[in-house]
């Protein structure tokens, strides 16, 4: 009888231990499921959350390249640019790369520029103001924002002709690097200067394959006669956007021009300045 009575507490203790183990396993499973749900939610709504912890790279200073005076063939006879025609430009300088987030923020901090309309970028949830992306092109800016920054920096938005000559040189190439179509179609934005082999004849980078870029001109039809230092149409409703982030070969060329309302902004469009 004593052995029977003493075995019951032992059985109860064994059952209690097993119950604790089961409850512990259930708790671990629940915590794991909660963790998976949280991780999944973060990936869905903030896929680059850990970018917030990345250290800031050294800030790039604006560098300009020189484009000599002379004539070049602007445009091509295709549906995107239309009407190839000769253009003569005086010598000018232009930013080697698009204006970066960090460079633009200096103007914002000085109270001279408005912050980008949104803080994201194409395929990047948190972008502007995140140190990791300091040396990436600023986006989500209007034509007016771009113009104001260039004025603050003592420069101006390049004319459409200046932008295209910078990209194409004088040999009529389709891309800044030549006439060979790109092997990879990027989805931008990328850190400025990511592909130095894609530089233009004058050493300018990211003219094709990073972000779209605002230029100074109103959108209008090209003339067919020689133009000297053209500034585009005298009036209009849309400004010109150049460059491409790459999705179709047809809009990757250095001659492609896109009309956009100057008050518009998106997470794929930035700019560079000229002097």
Image: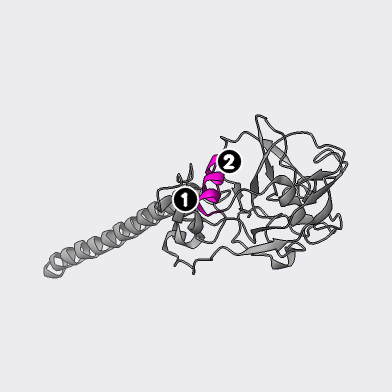
Residue found 86% across the figure and 58% down from its top: 171
Q: Position of residue 141 (x, y in %)?
A: 54, 44
Q: Nearer the viewer, residue 223 or 190?
A: 223
* Magenta stretch encompasses residue 108: no
Residue bounds of the magenta highlight: 139-154
Residue 81 marker: none
Q: Nearer the viewer, residue 164 or 1?
A: 164
* Magenta stretch encompasses residue 142: yes
* Residue 5 picture quarter: bottom left
Q: Nearer the viewer, residue 151 or 247?
A: 151
* Quadrant of image for the C terminus: bottom right
- Under tag 1, what secondary structure? loop
Question: Would you say residue 30 is visible in this rendering?
Answer: yes
Which residue extends farthest left? Answer: 2
Q: Position of residue 233 (x, y in %)?
A: 72, 34
Tell me if label 1 and label 2 are in contact, CB under 8 Å.
Answer: no
Q: Main secondary structure of the magenta part?
A: helix
Residue found 65% across the figure and 29% down from its top: 237
Q: Residues within 10 Å of mark 2 (few under 14, many from 20)?
A: many
Residue found 50% across the figure and 58% down from its top: 103
Q: Which residue is mark 2?
A: 143
In the picture, measured across the screen, residue 161 lies left or right of residue 20, that is: right
In the picture, measured across the screen, residue 115 lies left or right of residue 6, that is: right
Q: Position of residue 24 (x, y in %)?
A: 30, 60
Residue 46 marker: 1
């Amino acid at each position: 009888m004593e052995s029977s009575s003493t075995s019951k507490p032992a059985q109860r203790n064994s059952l209690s231990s097993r119950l604790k183990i089961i409850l512990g396993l259930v708790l671990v499973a629940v915590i794991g499921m909660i963790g998976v749900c949280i991780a999944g939610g973060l990936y869905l709504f903030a896929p680059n959350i850990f970018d917030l912890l990345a250290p800031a790279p050294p800030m790039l200073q604006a560098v300009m390249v020189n484009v000599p005076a002379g004539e070049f063939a602007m445009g091509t006879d295709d549906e995107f640019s239309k009407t190839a025609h000769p253009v003569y430009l005086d010598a000018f300088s232009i930013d080697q790369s698009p204006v970066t987030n960090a460079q633009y923020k200096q103007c914002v901090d000085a109270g001279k520029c408005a912050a980008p309309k949104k803080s994201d970028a194409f395929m990047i949830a948190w972008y502007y103001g995140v140190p990791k992306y300091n040396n990436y092109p600023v986006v989500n800016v209007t034509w007016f924002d771009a113009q104001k920054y260039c004025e603050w920096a003592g420069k101006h938005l390049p004319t459409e002709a200046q932008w295209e000559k910078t990209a194409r040189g004088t040999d009529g190439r389709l891309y800044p690097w030549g006439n060979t179509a790109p092997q990879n179609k990027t989805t931008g934005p990328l850190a400025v200067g990511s592909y130095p082999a894609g530089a233009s004849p004058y050493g300018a980078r990211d003219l094709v394959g990073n972000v779209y870029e605002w230029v100074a001109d109103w959108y209008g039809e090209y003339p067919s006669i020689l133009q000297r230092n053209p500034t585009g149409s005298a009036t209009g409703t849309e400004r010109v956007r150049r460059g491409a982030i790459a999705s179709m070969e047809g809009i990757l060329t250095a001659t492609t021009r896109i009309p956009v309302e100057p008050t518009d902004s998106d997470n794929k469009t930035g700019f560079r300045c000229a002097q």
